[in-house]
Amino acid sequence: MISNQQYLNWQKRIKESPAFRRFWAFWGIYSVLLLFIISGYLLFIGEWKKVLLAFLAFVLARLILSPFIYLFYKKARPYQVLNFIPVHSWLFSEPTIKPNSFPSDHAASWASISLVLGYFFPPFGITLILFMIINGMARVVLGYHDEKDILAGWLAGLVSAWAAVFWLLPLLFTL
C-alpha cells in the first residue's frame, strides 16, 4: 500500500523536476492520445467494427459501470485527503471535489479498449497492455488514485471488454 508520505514525496519531485513531471503527466493524462492514434490507424485500414467494439467496451466501463459503482461507494482521492493540487489538464484530468476515486476511470478506459483491440490484434494488445500498466502507475504517482482504484478500474475494463467481445460482437456483427 502506498503511504501518504510517498505521495507527498512524489509531489515534491514533480515540483522540482520538470522531466519527472512531464513523464508522469504524459502517461497519466495525455497518453490517451496513443489510443486515438492506434484507433485512427485501425479505422484507416478498414477495421471499423473492431474499433466500434472497443468504443462500446469503453462506454460500458466509463459511462455505465464506474458511475454505477460511484452511486454506492464514495472514496476520496489521495490529493483530496492530502490536500495538494495534482498535475492536471482542463481537457482530460481536472481536479474535482467529488469522492470518486474508486474505480479509476482512466484504468477502466485503458483496460476496456486495450483488451478488445488486443483480442483482435495481439501485437497491439501487448503494447497497449504495457501502456495501460504505465498509465495506472502514473495515476498513482500523480496522486489521483491508489493501487486498489487502479486494479478495480482494470477489472471494470476487463468485464467491459469481455462483454463487448463475447456478448456484443455476436449480437451486432459477423466478422
Image (spheres, grey):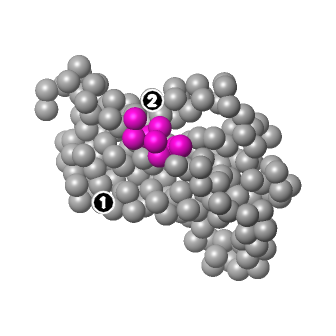
Residue 46 location in percent, x, y? 19, 42
- In the rendered view of the protein, which quadrant contains the N terminus? bottom right
Question: Which residue does the numbered mark 1 point to in the structure image?
Answer: 126
Q: Are marks 1 and 2 in contact (CB under 8 Å)?
A: no
Query: Which region is colored magenta?
Result: 152-159
Mark 1 or 2, nearer chain start = 2
Question: Helix, strand or loop at disc 2?
Answer: helix
* Label 1 environment density (alpha carbons within 10 Å; few <14, some 14–19, many ≥20): some
In this picture, residue 113 sits left or right of residue 126: right
Residue at horizontal 33 percent and vertical 29 percent from the top: 163
What amino acid does circle 1 point to?
A: Ile
In this picture, residue 81 sits left or right of residue 136: right
Quarter-of-image position of residue 37: bottom left
What amino acid does circle 2 point to?
A: Leu
Residue 131, placed above or below residue 66? below
Q: Is residue 42 visible?
A: no
Question: Which residue does the numbered mark 2 point to in the structure image?
Answer: 60
Residue 152 location in percent, x, y? 53, 43
Question: Helix, strand or loop at disc 1?
Answer: helix
Most extreme residue toward the top is 171
Residue 56 location in percent, x, y? 38, 31
Residue 166: say if magenta.
no
Residue at horizontal 76 percent and vertical 73 percent from the top: 9
